[in-house]
Structure formats: structure tokens, C-alpha cells
Amino acid sequence: MSGKRILVIEDDPRVREACVDILGELGHTLVAVDDGARALAEIARAAPDVILLDLLMPRAKMDGLEFLSRVATGPAAHTPVIILSALGETLARHLSRDITAELRIAAILPKPVALDALVHEIDRVHAVGTSL
Amino acid sequence: MPDLTARRIRLVLVDDHPLIVRGLQTLFAAEPEFEVVAACLTSADGLAAVRAHRPDIVLLDIRMPHLDGFGVLRALNGDAVSPRIVLLTADINEQATLEAVRLGVHGIVLKDMPSPQLLECLRRVHAGEHWVEQRSVGRALAGFVQREASLREVSRVLTAREIEVVRMVAGGLRSASIASKLHVSEGTVKTHLHRIYEKLHVDGRVQLILLAREKGIA
């Protein structure tokens, strides 16, 4: 499978660096930022194939929730999003398939993120599209 | 016996009710592991105290005049280094809990919580843990995402102006008030409404309000 351009939006530097290291070793091109506003700027330069998104980033100018709203009108409106969240399990329980499909949410992974699950979801997104 | 005063948990208290502040001071005075470095009755004094004393934890009231607890959180988030924050509140709903978590609070405690639990919350937050009801935050987070999905769905059908009209109708405004706010005639608003009813397959204003509430665009 060819490498993809993956945009990581995460304010925890440990998670960000782990994603860059591990997914980079697998042949993907990683762009990692700690703020939704920077992510939109990166998207304007080149739309990613997959977005990894942390929803709650208190010190960011734009957190993941606001990013999710803003990305809908740009060039990455149809890019699959994998959500990384400490509240991932609760979130997944409350969101229907219709809602995740509408927002192009391909997967919701609880934090701490199991990197093998992340790799699996990225492969799956490439293979089958964005349904949960 | 370990010396609990060797590394005390340094606190700043911010609450506009003197009785609450006095009660907290009395509570912490009896606990050798805690030290109140400042007790403030206004958010402005609280911000100044946090920046001057660099405490471990700020115990912060949400509802305060001029700048509320959320305003204080936003201000502190702009600083290079900010302490851990525990919100102190008489009550809090899911939306406010989500807002607090989005702003990075480490704990939320109710004012009627027994003292031992408050002390335990502060110990845990000081140790790097969070003291927030996770299910409530999760539900609020899901609600936010759900509203966003509904808005996108509706955005494909309605124009931006039509969505604005829907929000105003759902907010209880009559056509004349909407016309005044949008600087258009009442007839134009009625035309917008007619198109909105057709596009959303609703029979009238009541159904539209119900639909807007269901989809979270009210």
C-alpha cells in the first residue's frame, strides 16, 4: 500500500511524536501540528489523505471541536478523520453511524492510543473508506 | 511520620462570596499539606495573585461578576505557564462542563461536596489526575459532534441566510423582529420561511422549531 499524507492535530507532544515516528517508518508522510488553526493552514497548502484529530486542546487557538466545524468548508471536507480522545469510548457509544458518516469520522480511538490499533485503522481507511 | 508541610500544595482561592472564601481558609488552615497563598474576592485579584504567586492549584468559582471563571481560564490559558485549575460551583450542566474541559480544567467540584472529597480532589489534581465526571463530558462532547453533523446536513439544503432565519425562529423571534434584525422587509422573511418549509418538508413554524431543536441548530 502506498504511503499517505497524514495530518496529525494533537497538543500532547508525546502522542504527536509517537505518531510521526511510527507512521513515518511505515512509509507515510506526516505533518504534525498542535493547533487547529495551524492545521487549516497546512490543509490550504496540501490536502491530507487522513486526519488524526485530538478534540480537546485547551491551550490551542482552535481546538479539535472547532476544527471539525471549520474543516467542513475547505479542501479537506471529504478527508476521513480519525479521532483520538480520552473520552473515545463514551463518544463512540453516543454517536450513530449516520453522524460519523456525515462528519467523515472513520474511527474513534480512546487515549492512551494503542498504536497498533491506529495503524490498523489507517490501513482500513485506505482499504474500505470511512465507515466505522 | 512524614512532614506534610515539607512540600505543601499551594492554593489560590477565587470566589466572590466572602463566606465561602472564609470557610475554605478555615478548612485548609487545619490541613498541614495545604497552604493558601492568596484568597481573592474578585477575578481580577485572582488573576493577579496567580501570576504573582504561581500556585500549584487555583480553586476558582465559575459565577463571578465582571469576569467569570471561564474568563479567568481563558486569560490563564494565554500565559506561558498556568497552574492546575479546579472549578468550584453550586451546580453545572453538561454544556458548561464541556466548556470547562475545553478550557483545560483539571477538576470540577460542587460547593456542597463534603470537605474530605474536596481535599481528595485537590490531592489527585496535584498528582496530575483529573477530577471530572467523564460520562457527563462524554455525553456533552457527543452532543456537540451530533449538532455539528446536523448543521452540515442542513447546510447542504439551506443557504446561510436561511439557517440564520431558522435560528432566529427557533429562538422565538417573530417575522417582524427577524426582518428588523436582518434589515429586510417582513415579506422577504416570509419568503425565506416559505422556502425553508418546502426544503425541510415541514408544515409551519412549530414544526420548524421542533426540527431545529432536534438538530441542535436552535
Image (spheres, rainbow, N blue to C red):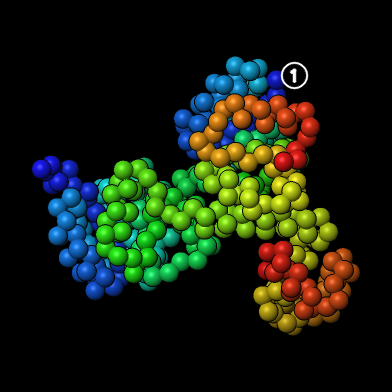
Q: Residue at position x 29%, y 53% from top?
A: B120
**Amino acid carrying mark 1 in the image:** Met
Q: Where is residue A108 in the image (x, y as percent from the top left)?
A: 63, 41
Q: Is residue A43 left or right of residue B86?
A: right
Q: Is residue B199 visible?
A: yes
Would residue B204 appear left or right of A77 to someone viewing this image?
right
Looking at the image, residue A80 lies above or below residue B113 = above
User: Callout 1 environment at 10 Å: few (<14), some (14 to 19), or many (20+)?
Assistant: few
Quarter residue A9 falls in: top right
- Residue B210 picture location, percent across and down: 74, 73
Q: In this view, does B138 lie to the left or right of A129?
A: left
Residue B117 appears in which quarter of the rendering? bottom left
Frontmost residue, A117 versus B87 = A117
What residue is shown at x 65% (from left), y 17% (from top)? A27
Q: In which quarter of the image is the C terminus of chain A?
A: top right
Vertical arrangement, residue B133 with respect to residue B204, above or below: above
Left or right, B77 with reference to B54:
right
Q: Mark 1 points at which residue?
A: A1
Report the label total.
Answer: 1
Q: Which chain carries label 1?
A: A
Q: In this view, does A66 lie above or below A112?
A: below
Residue A59 lies, in percent from the top left, at 46, 45
